[in-house]
């Protein structure tokens, strides 16, 4: 274990979690970020030395410097570390190093559903007394944030495929929820994405286990060369299957879990949509590799009511419900719109913020097709993230491709539109991976 670690961009949700794990193990931690936040303040209260903003002078001879792919190559701290010959470690590699300290690390991968499924595992392990260390890509009430430092040999973390980062991990149990074309600013095509997941599957030792979605052909392809046992879970196909599915008025599913023709447990979810049945099945399969407490597994799933920004009910004012969801890929949009359609409401007003120019351009037709299901759709400006506007695609073009959709520039104008048109009994749905959630918060504050 390192004695002194510096994080560039320590305020990020994943970087801060790594910093907290190290601090809890007595490692001296320093870090920097652009602006102070509640996260950086919490890290300072735990003993971290925080510098705002980035400054080459804060590189005080640490053992290593941890950074992410979002950090520019000319970042002053990155430049300073190189000039001093200090070892540089990318975030994913650091996660992989930490995983090696646990006997049973669990890595949750997939194009969609990683945060939700990881969160489900956190709740399940709380009910089955497995006490894991857990890193989640969203905030959970049960954790009071995104991290839990446990005292057992279990660790749970999300495994992101971007730039093949998850190939730096060391999982004992791996989960692949689904595989689709995404991150096409890095991957050549879908086959290239599948090959990365195939490499991820090969990381799992023969004593471990790989859990896959049995209804996803791409998951089956990715698992073909796994050297560990492969366990499938699905609605149509799988070693674990969901049968006798029903939904309540909020779109929450109840179903029986069937294995080898026998019902082994019954489950009631507190998150909506068919996609969460798949997430739950995969977490059940993984959990039952570690425990035979099916009652505890069921209790954990029922108690899980979603992570922040995953179909999160933000509040209600004057009879209008505001929901926020992180959906930013066409398949996620389809699942979210399907889930909201199961809630009894007069109307749903949806505002979607595309995430990155590259994704919007490469999946333009898919976005247009899935967003057409929204009954009252507003398209906000593209959230650029790490990209520059090339002028090749715009939100106005996306709105023009969808009958009845409106492009509205600026959160204040979107807010004014919703305030003028929404009525009691309606739902306002904010959707996207950027900062579109602020529109819902503004509506609740200013209505």
Image (spheres, helix red, strand yellow):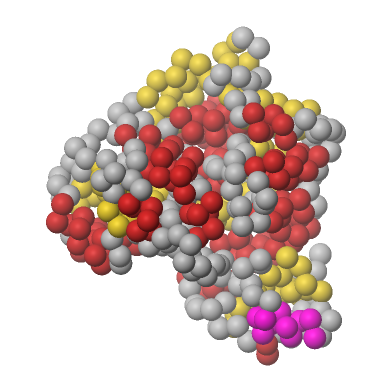
- Quick one: quadrant of the C terminus? bottom left
Type of secondary structure dominating the magenta stretch: helix
Residue 169 showing in the rendered view = no
Instruction: Indicate left or right for 318 with 277 as reference.
Output: left
Residue at x 65% of width, y 12% of height: 260
Q: Is residue 129 left or right of residue 351?
A: right
Q: Residue at x 51, y 74 (%)?
A: 41
x and y percentages locating residue 158 in the rendered image: 63, 49
Residue located 80% across and 33% down the image: 226
Segment colored magenta: 74-83
How many numbered dots are placed on residues in this image? 0
**Residue 292, relative to residue 388: is it above or below?**
above
Q: Quadrant of residue 383?
A: bottom left
Q: Position of residue 193 (x, y in %)?
A: 68, 45
Residue 367: x %, y % from top left: 44, 46
Q: Nearer the viewer, residue 348 or 102?
A: 348
Q: Hey, which quadrant is residue 291 in on the image?
A: top right
Taking the view exactly as shown, the residue that stands out farthest to the top is 261
Depth order, front residue of 94/422 = 422
Q: Is residue 44 magenta?
A: no
């Amino acid at each position: 274990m390192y004695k002194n670690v510096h994080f560039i961009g320590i305020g990020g949700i994943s970087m801060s979690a790594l910093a907290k794990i190290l601090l809890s193990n007595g490692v001296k931690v320093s870090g920097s970020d652009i602006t102070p936040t509640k996260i950086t303040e919490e890290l300072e209260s735990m003993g971290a030395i925080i510098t705002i903003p980035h400054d080459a002078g804060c590189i005080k001879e640490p053992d290593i410097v941890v950074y992410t792919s979002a950090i520019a190559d000319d970042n002053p701290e990155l430049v300073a570390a190189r000039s001093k010959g200090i070892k540089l470690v990318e975030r994913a590699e650091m996660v992989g190093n930490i995983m090696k300290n646990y006997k049973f690390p669990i890595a949750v991968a997939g194009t969609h559903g990683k945060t939700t499924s990881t969160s489900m595992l956190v709740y399940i392990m709380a009910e089955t007394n497995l006490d894991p260390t857990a890193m989640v890509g969203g905030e959970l009430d049960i954790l009071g944030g995104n991290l839990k430092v446990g005292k057992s040999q279990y660790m749970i973390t999300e495994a992101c495929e971007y730039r093949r980062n998850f190939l730096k991990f060391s999982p004992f149990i791996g989960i692949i929820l689904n595989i689709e074309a995404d991150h096409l600013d890095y991957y050549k095509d879908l086959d290239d994405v599948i090959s990365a997941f195939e490499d991820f599957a090969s990381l799992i030792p023969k004593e471990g286990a790989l859990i896959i979605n049995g209804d996803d052909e791409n998951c089956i392809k990715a698992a073909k060369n796994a050297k560990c046992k492969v366990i499938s879970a699905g609605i149509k196909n799988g070693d674990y299957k969901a049968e006798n599915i029903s939904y309540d008025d909020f779109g929450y599913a109840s179903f029986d879990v069937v294995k080898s023709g026998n019902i082994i447990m019954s489950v009631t979810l507190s998150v909506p949509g068919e996609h969460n049945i798949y997430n739950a099945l995969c977490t059940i399969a993984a959990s039952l590799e570690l425990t035979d407490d099916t009652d505890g597994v069921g209790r954990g799933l029922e108690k899980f009511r979603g992570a922040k920004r995953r179909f999160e009910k933000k509040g209600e004012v004057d009879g209008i419900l505001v929901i926020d969801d992180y959906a930013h890929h066409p398949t996620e949009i389809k699942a979210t719109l399907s889930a909201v359609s199961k809630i009894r409401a007069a109307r749903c007003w949806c505002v979607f913020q595309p995430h990155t120019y590259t994704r919007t351009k490469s999946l333009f037709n898919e976005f247009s097709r899935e967003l057409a299901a929204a009954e009252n759709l507003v398209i906000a400006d593209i959230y650029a993230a790490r990209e520059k506007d090339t002028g090749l695609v715009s939100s106005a073009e996306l709105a023009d491709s969808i009958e009845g959709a409106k492009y509205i520039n600026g959160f204040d104008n979107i807010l004014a539109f919703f305030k003028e048109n929404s009525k009691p009994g309606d739902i306002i749905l904010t959707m996207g991976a950027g900062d579109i959630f602020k529109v819902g918060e503004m509506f609740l504050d200013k209505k």
